[in-house]
Amino acid sequence: MIPENFPFLNKVLSFLVTLSFILMIAVVVLQVVARYALPWSPNWTEELARFSFIYMVSLGAGLAIKDREYVSVDTLQEYVSPTVKKYLEVSILVLIFLFMAVMFYFSLPLVKIVQIRQSPAMGLNMAIMYLSMSAMGLFTSLYAAFQLIQRLKQP
């Protein structure tokens, strides 16, 4: 797990993921109710639900690494020795770290490129949406690095 001297980051990310989830559910419920109960339905709800989902996944990916709650297929790990299992876990964490660090690095110029665009229904700056890629790369690589350090310290 991530060292306990970073509880603020854990709490902030957990809060933002929860907020994104609640916002997504509320907007979808509003859309469904508006379709059947009102003569019109807001056209921005689909876009806001999509944006909320994107941020929920992007920010939650780092927390999944922190708590080791990501999807994994461990069939191979059941049949290998503890030493090989440790090497597999370390290799997976290294690959996650490298992939997410590369994604973070290359997403920053993309955010700059799309800052002139606006979302169609809400008129939001698209840099805000593409920033979710940067956030995912940053936080996931950070948590993967902490997990990797912790796993290397274990016997």
Image: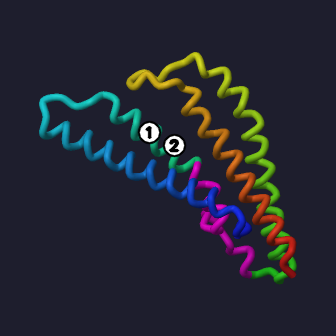
Q: Which amino acid type corresponds to the residue marked 2 in the rendered image?
A: Ile
Q: Residue at x 47, y 25 (%)?
A: 124
* Res 86 → quadrant: bottom right
Q: How is the image coloured?
A: rainbow
Q: Nearer the viewer, residue 80 or 124?
A: 124
Q: Nearer the viewer, residue 86 or 23?
A: 23
Residue 152 horizontal/vertical position (percent): 86, 71
Residue 50 has which mark?
A: 1
Q: Is residue 134 left or right of residue 17?
A: right
Q: Secondary structure at mark 1?
A: helix
Note whether 56 is above or below 127 in the view shown. below
The residue sitting at 70% across, 34% down in the picture is: 107
The residue sitting at 65% across, 28% down in the picture is 111
The reply to whether discs 1 and 2 touch (Cβ–Cβ < 8 Å) is yes
Residue at (78, 41) in percent of width and height: 102
Question: How far from the left and from the top, in percent, is residue 132?
Answer: 59, 39
Residue kind at label 1, given as amino acid type:
Arg
Quadrant in which the N terminus appears: bottom right
Where does label 2 land, which residue?
54
Disc 2 element: helix
Residue 26 colored in magenta in the image: no
| Place of residue 78 in the rendered image (x, y in percent of width and height, measured from the top left) | 72, 80
Figure check: 110 above or below 89: above
Question: In this rendering, would 138 be left or right of 116?
Answer: right
- x%, y% of residue 61? 61, 54
- The 10 Å Cα crowd at callout 2, few under 14, some 14 to 19, many 20 or more, is some
As drawn, which residue projects farthest toward the top? 116
**Which stretch did the figure color magenta?**
59-78
How many marks do you count on the picture? 2
Q: Residues within 10 Å of mark 1 (few under 14, many from 20)?
A: some
